[in-house]
Image (cartoon, helix red, strand yellow):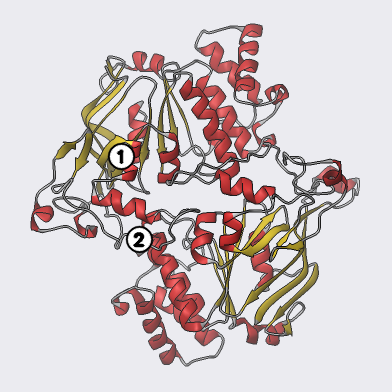
Amino acid sequence: MALLSIDGLSVHYYTLSGIVRAVDDVSLNLELGEWVSIVGESGSGKSTLGFSTIRLTPPPGRIVGGSIVFNGVDIVKAPDSVLRKIRGREISMIFQDPMTSLDPLRTVGSQLKEVVEDHGIGRGKEAGEIAKRGLLSVGLPENAFYSYPHQLSGGQRQRVAIAIATVLRPKLLIADEPTTALDVIVQKSIMDLLEDYNRKGMSVLLITHDVALASERSRKIAVMYAGELVEFGDTRSVIEDPLHPYTQLLIRSVPDVVGEKRLTYIPGEPPDLRRPPSGCRFHPRCPFADSMCKVERPKQTVISGRAVLCHYAGTVKVRD
Amino acid sequence: MVLVEARDLKKYFPVEKGVIERILARKVRYVRAVDNVSLEVGKGETLALVGESGSGKSTLGRLLVRLLDPDGGTITFNGIDITRLKGEKLRKLRRRFQIIFQDPYASLNPRMVVGEQIAQPLTELELASASEAKSEALKILKSVGLVPPEDFYNKYPHQLSGGQRQRVAIARALIVKPDFIVADEPVSMLDVSIRASILDILETFKRELSLSTLFITHDLAVARLVGEKLAIMYLGKIVEEGPTEDILEKPLHPYTKALIDSIPSIRKREKSKLGLKDVTPDPVNPPEGCRLYPRCPFATEECKLREPKLETIKGRRVACHYPLQ
């Protein structure tokens, strides 16, 4: 059985200028110990999906349909008391900017210790020891315990955030663009660290705009476009033989330091999700769109273990 | 032919002092953002300048277009020394070097329709009358792909997407037909699916105006797409410079190699990956000797004591005592 099973999830933002359909009928599974990456551009709904997984949808957003079953518990319907036990201990989360999640006026050590104490793992001196071990395990020196967040670099702060997120040994870590604000050399070391945790059994749900990063690190990739999950499957097959036209064009747009040099882009812009296009949401930018795509919303089809949201999945291929 | 040349350029920013330090009149400390940098950009050439945050790459770009005054060294533009140029003389030359910034949300005036913002440099520099400027603005709107131009002329920045705003910023910089532009991370805030469309526009202008460009980016993969030449900066210094493909294929400086090895790629690479130690360099007190030595796995006693000079090896400039083989 899957550790996390999201089924038909819809999340809408009720803004003054209309309803934003940020996540629309999204289904995906994550097995115990797996690393799944959700890839999408800005406004694709990937972060909303991440937050909603632990029911932290930022207002005015609301989960309007579907279920999120984690380890047998439906997160959407669970009472707050149950949810409080799951957050932090079973599922935890790290963000792009750790400075916003750390208290600037308290030492890193005391913040880490607090997490340990609040969840009843240890008290006083014992909690301090657990906290120190936590810092060591993310590769920070022991004296980081007494540092304030501003005394650390961006990479070190993200290590602290990871220490806090993993000290209770959660089953699942949701990482929302954890390295976007960091330089590439530091990014690599943070990703290596997450990979270590993943190897030791922690499942990872990485939310990123970086297809290349996702392709190097994850077992499965879920591609989102305009609030919908357009393709989901095993990383190698999604990258090497993408089935959805958006995935095909997206991968071709990614610049690389090796291989062929080309300037490829997708014409047009992502839609306004207050008024999503009729039919398939990608049809205004899709080179294969026909009259059916304009009118009829595609249903998810499964082709050799891959879920694809396209009327012509498997029959269309972007050529060079 | 060399269009822009910097020699031993320096920019030191004083570090803000606290009250106590000011009372005690402690010595002013400096961040050496750009420290003895020399580079050349040829006519019609794009030099990609790559570095991590804090490397001084943006400061260097601003120095070259005289938005910042250097603390040392010289800048020559088309044979003219512009290092200390002031007033009317500098204003006259401004037409010939322009800059495009990273954030098109911050660089455009929110209360002015974009057409007027694009036309403004022409009237401001007295290159055209108001009506000529307007027709030029409409023309350039079309060439940056904002069609129909009449519609876009009267739009405000908030009515445009990020990609469209960056097109406006490009149009405004290029309407005066400059010879040289500094493009400071022009696509970093844009989604990957539209990034190349902006690079495409810059490429077209480069060909049409035989434009010289200093393209500043933190992303080596983007640098590879735009620049025939590449310069890598670390803590205020250029550590390696040369033809882009040569460097990417066989970096000579350990820092360059670490950068290349750290970039995620969708194509499989079976290369040895060089990591650097996770030490945060302090730009106020940069290491003596080679600035990379606290992080470099190959560092020796010599690296700690003696600063390597940029030396020419195999058609490239490299600042390392032990360049990679």
Image coords of residue B17 (percent x, y) = 80, 48
Mark number, residue A222: none
Image vertical order of residue B55 relative to residue B178, above or below: above
Would you call the spot at circle 1 few (<14 residues within 10 Å), some (14-19), or many (20 or more)? some
- Disc sitting over residue A265 in the figure: 2
Q: Is residue B90 above or below residue A291?
A: below
**Residue A149 sits above or below residue A70 on the image:** below
Please tell me whether mark 2 sits on a helix, a strand or a loop: loop
Indicate the position of residue A293 as horizontal and vertical percent values. 12, 53
Q: CA distance from mark 1 to mark 2?
A: 22 Å
Residue at 35% across, 50% down: A251
- The kind of secondary structure element at disc 1 is helix
**Quadrant of the snapshot with the N terminus of chain B:** bottom right
A225 and B31: which one is in front?
Answer: A225
Whether residue A17 is visible to the viewer of this picture, yes or no, is: no
Q: Nearer the viewer, residue A55 or B291?
A: B291
Which image quadrant is residue A141 in? top right
Q: Judge from the rendering whether residue A263 lies leftward or rightward of residue B68; answer left or right.
A: left
Q: Amino acid at mark 1?
A: Ser
Chain bearing tag 2 is A
Disc 2 residue crowd, few under 14, some 14–19, many 20+, Cα 10 Å: many
The residue wearing badge 1 is: A237
Residue B324 in the image: x percent, y percent? 70, 49
